[in-house]
Amino acid sequence: MGSYTGAVNSDAVPVDVAPNVRRAVIRQALSVSVATGLYGISFGALAVAAGLSIAQTMALSLLMFSGASQFAVVGVIGAGGGAASAIATSGLLGVRNGLYGLQLGPLLALRGWRRVAAAHFTIDESTAVATAQVTPGARRLGFWWAGLGVFVCWNCLTLAGALVGNALGDPKAWGLDAAAAAAFLGLLWPRLATRPAQVCAGLAVVIACVLVPLAPAGVPVLGAATAAIVVGAWQVRRGGEGQRE
C-alpha cells in the first residue's frame, strides 16, 4: 500500500483512507441516510392507504428501493390507475439510476459480485455522496455507507409507516396524503436554479394540468416527462446553431 492514504483494492471497499477523511465521509453518509429514511414513514403509510398490504409494501420497498419510483407506483394505484401505468411511470423515473451507473462505474471500478450488488444501491443519495469525494477510496466508502445506510433506514421506517398507517386509517385526516407531493417538491426545488430547468418544470406543469382531467392516472406524469425531451432538444439545437455562428 505504501504511504498513499487513498489506496484501495481493485474490487473491494476502501482499505486505506485517512482516519479524518473516513470519519467525515461516514458522518456525511449517515446524516443523508437518516434524513432520507424519514420519508419512508410517509411511503409506508401511503402504500397501505392505497390498498397494499404490509407485506406488499415491504416487498416493493426492499426490491425496488427507489423512493421516487415507489411513490409513483403508490400514487398511480391510489388514484385508480392500472398496473401498466404504474410500471411505466416508475420505470421512467428509474431511468436516472441507470445514468448514475454510467457515472459511477469508472469512479468505483468494482468487479464481480460487488458490481452486481452495487447496482441495487445506486440511488440519488449514494451517487451524491460518492461523487462529492476526492479520492477513489473515499468515493467507495461514501457510496457503500450511503447506499447501505439509506437501505436500512428507509426499509425500517417504511415498516413503521405501514404499521402506523394501518392503525391510523384514512391518511387524509392526518395530512399524509400530501406527503408524497411535498417530498417531490422538496427534492425538485433546489434543481430549479437554471433557466432550462425552470422552463422544463413550467412546461411539465402545463402538460400535466391539461392531461389530468382527460387521461387515466399515471399518463399525465408520462406526458409531463416529454417536457424534458423538448427542452433537451431545444438546447442541443441552440448549441449547434451557436457553433455554426
Image: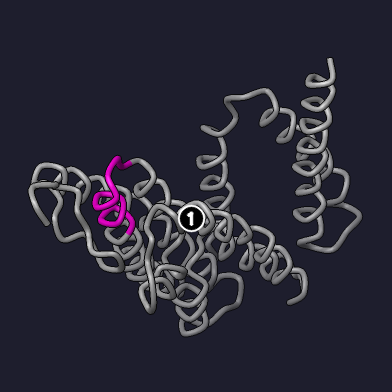
> Which residue appears at 52% of the width and 72% of the height?
64
Q: Which residue has dot 1 on it?
A: 174
Q: Is residue 152 above or below residue 7?
A: below
The residues colored magenta run 133-143
The answer to whether residue 134 is magenta is yes
Give amino acid for label 1. Trp
- The colour mode here is one colour
Q: Quadrant of residue 221?
A: bottom right
45 on left or right of 13: right
Task: Give the main secondary structure, helix, strand or loop, of the magenta stretch.
Answer: helix
Where residue 25 sits in the image (x, y, percent)?
A: 22, 46
Q: Residue furthest right?
A: 214
Q: Nearer the viewer, residue 102 or 233?
A: 102
Q: Is residue 56 above or below residue 66?
A: below
Where residue 142 sits in the image (x, y, percent)?
A: 29, 52
Numbered disc 1: secondary structure = helix
Q: Nearer the viewer, residue 80 or 23?
A: 23
The answer to whether residue 188 is magenta is no
- Quarter in which the N terminus is drawn: bottom left
Where residue 159 sits in the image (x, y, percent)?
A: 38, 73
Q: Is residue 42 above or below residue 20?
A: below
